[in-house]
Image (cartoon, rainbow, N blue to C red):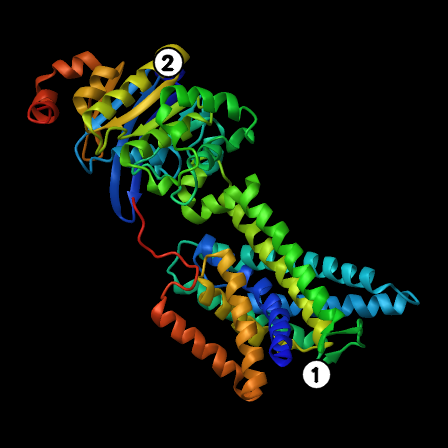
Amino acid sequence: MQYFVQQLINGLTLGSIYGLIAIGYTMVYGIIGMINFAHGDIFMIGAFTALIVFLILGAVFYSVPVVIALLVMMIVAMLLTSLYNWTIEKVAYRPLRGSFRLAPLITAIGMSIALSNFVQVTQGPRNKPIPPMVSQVYNIGGISVSLKQIIIVIVTVSLLAIFWYVVNRTSLGRAQRACEQDRKMAALLGIDVDRTISITFIMGAALAAVAGTLFLMYYGVVVFSDGFVPGVKAFTAAVLGGIGSIPGAVVGGLMIGFIESMWSAYFSIDYKDVAAFSILAIVLIFLPSGILGRPEVEKV
Amino acid sequence: MASRALLDVRGVETYYGNIRALNGVNVAVNEGEIVALIGANGAGKSTLMMTIFGAPRARTGTITFGGNDITSLPTHEIARLRIAQSPEGRRIFPRMTVLENLQMGASLDNLKHFDEDAEKVFQLFPRLKERLSQRGGTLSGGEQQMLSIARALMARPKLLLLDEPSLGLAPLIVKQIFDAIRELNEKQGLTVFLVEQNAFGALKLATRGYVMVNGNVTMSGTGKELLANPEVRAAYLEGGRH
């Protein structure tokens, strides 16, 4: 039982990170109907930015409180990845809007390769480690919970709360949902659709940057190719939860996290990815639009 | 007179790919008028409504609104000049509530006059007030039509474009909607440009009218003149009315 709860906590941690990345996939899909395959690499760039900020902070100041260091890392990573994603949308995706559906998709794959190669060239191909930032581990009734895990869950929950508020309660969020449902009508009502799409890319990037910072803190290491596997997993999470649905992305992320940690604990760590993707296939056979996805049919 | 028109469409041609949908259209709408555009299916009426908003864009010709050339302005900037449209197919946001749909209509002023304007709209369409928290996609056709017009009114438009407000609605609701349009025009001086297949109702309501055939305006005149015109009667009224 203790072992099971332990795995539940590990899964929750992992799932939080996947969920944060998955929101970026699902929002962009919702608003322009394309899968932004470069999003995983945006996450990786977030992690690298956090690493660089960490090293600079360490070099400039004798000692920095962990909370402040983390906060600075996150904010700088958010700003930089937002700039990246905003630029990518503007130069690579926007000119292709209105062309055939595969064009932006292929461009996104190209962008993903370009970003990871760019980081490989500028930062080197090897793993980049950082010394552990947070090492406290608490023992609660035989279950060990690390402070790192607590930080990840708290940051994720508060970020999701802010995010939920923006999407559901502000005029910006209303405009985003309007563009998602009918872009042409939104424009007829005076909404600048291009600007709304840009903001959506920026919001997705900011969440991915936070996920990247948390990932770096959790594993203590990052490498240029780290955009790929977590990116694909987060994309899977978005599809599993129902692509286009924001709560679905979170639910899907948590599910992938749980499946992975349970499979690693009870079966074999080598096949955890197989397990995650098998579950995806099974869910999609019975629920083609995902767990919280909406069916395509709508009353007109 | 034409140069002082609120909306002036001159020599406009619009294409879908290589197919010409509008063929040099000239239409003018003066302040305070209700102008009706009638014509058969596929004549290009809705295309003209959307071309005014630059979606699709006119390939040749000019469109001016209040003296400003809006031919090549982006769609959202045209809307910001206070032209509002209740478009073909109503285009209610299906997964937003009635309230949110109305809020979308008022986004130009960032909801500054929302409560006051919403009250006015509810006087016209009391039904919407009962449905405030219902999702747009679950409304009946008539309710969606009311919501679409109400949403357009929330923008405080100088010019209201209505694309087939009577389409697919029960006669009683059509009358209700036409009464509402007349009331808005008479009491608030709202300028209305309206596309209709229900030629009889539209021409009775309108100050002036245009007849469109295959992307061309073939006739124009006051509502009464067109109603009395034998060609119009033969093509759009007799048989259609009963």
From what the image shows, is residue A273 above or below residue A296?
A: below
Residue A55 image point, x, y percent: 82, 70
Q: Is residue B131 visible?
A: yes
Residue A256 image point, x, y percent: 53, 72
Q: Identify the subunit bearing mark 2.
A: B
Residue B29 image point, x, y percent: 34, 19
Q: How many marks?
A: 2
From what the image shows, is residue A137 above or below residue A69?
A: below
Left or right of B82? Residue A265 is right
Badge 1 marks a residue whose secondary structure is loop
Image quadrant assignment for residue A291: bottom left
Q: Which image quarter is the C terminus of chain B in?
A: top left
Dot 1 corresponds to which residue? A126
- The residue drawn where x is 57% and y is 64% is A19
Say what amino acid the circle numbered 1 marks.
Arg
- The residue drawn where x is 54% and y is 23% is B113
Q: Nearer the viewer, residue B34 or A136?
A: A136
Residue B188 image point, x, y percent: 41, 13
- The residue drawn where x is 41% and y is 47% is A181
Image quadrant assignment for residue A244: bottom left
Q: Is residue A213 visible?
A: no
Badge 2 marks a residue whose secondary structure is loop
Left or right of A248? Residue A162 is right
Dot 2 corresponds to which residue? B32
